[in-house]
Image: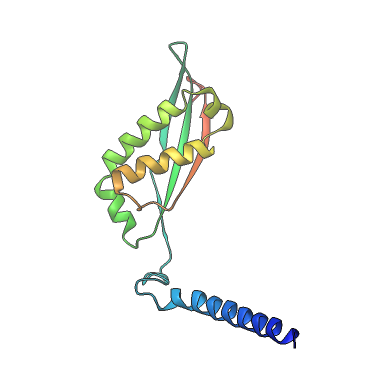
Amino acid sequence: MKRLPVILVLVLLLAGGGGGAWWYMNRDAEAPGVGPPAEAGRLPSFVKIDPIVLPLIQQNEVTRFVTVVITLEMPVDDATLQVELVKPRLMDALFTELHSLFGMRMVREQGPDSPLVRQRVKLVSERILGPGTVDAVLVQGVSKQRPGSG
């Protein structure tokens, strides 16, 4: 007879736990506005920015030029048009940011595809294009050239 209350308490705990888990798992699916976005079927757009040629200056002298190509991953279909509308401001902001970044020894040693460079390019791009408009950034260093070597 002493086992009956223990078994009854265990059954109630299991039933309560199972019911709570079921309720917790199913409440998110029924909540309004929760779920996959309406644009889930869309593929992201990749917008390649014109190459940016950066002069690297050390001790008041241009030591070399670095050509950098940036590709932005954007979640909208008309991303190319969106970038073209603000292209002069975007290019100026990117050139300024990259020039200041490449003044740092750490960035020069790690190269243009360092996490810091990608993060800062994304921040600058979103400042010009709007928050949430850039999903990811690819930064490629195409060439390094010494001045005077054609």
Compared to 84, does 110 lie above or below?
Answer: above
Q: Residue furthest left?
A: 85
Q: Please tell me which residue lies in front, 73 or 27.
A: 27
Q: Nearer the viewer, residue 105 or 88?
A: 105
Residue in the picture at 52% in, 34% down = 143
75 or 86: which is nearer to us? 75
User: Can see residue 113?
Assistant: no
Residue name at image x 35 percent, y 53 percent: 133
- Percent x, y for residue 106? 55, 26
In the displayed image of the protein, which residue is found farthest to the front?
1
Percent from the top left, x then y, of residue 92?
A: 31, 34
Q: Position of residue 83 (x, y in %)?
A: 31, 50
Q: Residue at coordinates 35% horizontally, 43% vertically from top-left? A: 125
Q: Residue at x 55, y 33 (%)?
A: 111
Q: Is residue 19 visible?
A: yes
Q: Quadrant of residue 81?
A: bottom left
Looking at the picture, the colour scheme in use is rainbow
What x and y, as percent, mark residue 16?
Answer: 57, 79
- Placement of 102 over or under 4, stated as above or below: above
